[in-house]
Amino acid sequence: MSIIRTVHARVEGGVQGVGYRAWVEHIARSFGLSGWVRNRRDGSVEMTLRGTPENVSEMLRKCQDGPPDARVEKVEILGEGAGAYESFEVLPTI
């Protein structure tokens, strides 16, 4: 039985209008993660990542840099341990 980690996180900074959500979706799928990503009206990007602890941790590290035009100021873990997701998707802005 493999251990699964689920993390709910928010990324702040210049992360909208720079392809951040599409980048997260691409990288998350390459790591075999499930979950979702969406923009928030406050200018942040919110996501849930589910997969092996190693892959989730590496994804969170990559989120600190983001795609080339992003200017990440903060990656904050909002919670851990809830949710089961079949795939990775981009959700509408809230």
Image (tube, helix red, strand yellow):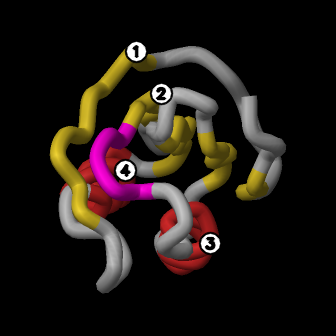
Q: How far is the residue under mark 2 from the one under mark 4?
A: 11 Å
Q: Nearer the viewer, mark 2 or mark 4?
A: 2
Q: Earlier in the sequence, mark 1 or mark 2?
A: 2
Give the CA separation, mark 3 to mark 4.
17 Å
In the rendered structure, find residue 56 and report the number of the disc placed on it: 4
Residue 77: image location, x then y, percent:
31, 25
3D distance between C-alphas at marks 4 and 1: 13 Å
Mark 3 or mark 4, earlier in chain: 3
Exactly how many numbered labels are in the figure?
4
Tag 3 secondary structure? helix
Q: Earlier in the sequence, mark 4 or mark 1?
A: 4
CA gap, disc 2 to disc 3? 18 Å
Real-space Cα separation, disc 1 to disc 2, in angstroms: 5 Å
Q: Is residue 4 visible?
A: no
Type of the residue with mark 1: Gly
Residue hosting label 3: 22
Q: Residues within 10 Å of mark 4 (few under 14, many from 20)?
A: many
Magenta segment boundaries in residue numbering: 11-15
Q: Secondary structure at mark 1?
A: strand
> Which residue sits at x=17%, y=46%?
73
Task: Write down the residue under mark 2.
Answer: 8
Q: Are marks 1 and 2 in contact (CB under 8 Å)?
A: yes
Where is residue 28 drawn, in percent x and y? Answer: 53, 65
Q: Residue at x 28, y 47 (%)?
A: 13
Closest to the camera, between mark 3 and mark 1, is 3
| Residues tagged 4 and 1 counted as in contact (Cβ below 8 A) | no
Three-letter amino acid code of the residue under disc 4? Val
Observer-side mark, 4 or 1, equals: 1
Marks 3 and 1, how far apart at CA: 23 Å
- Counting residues from the N terminus, which is met first, the one under dot 2 or under dot 4? 2
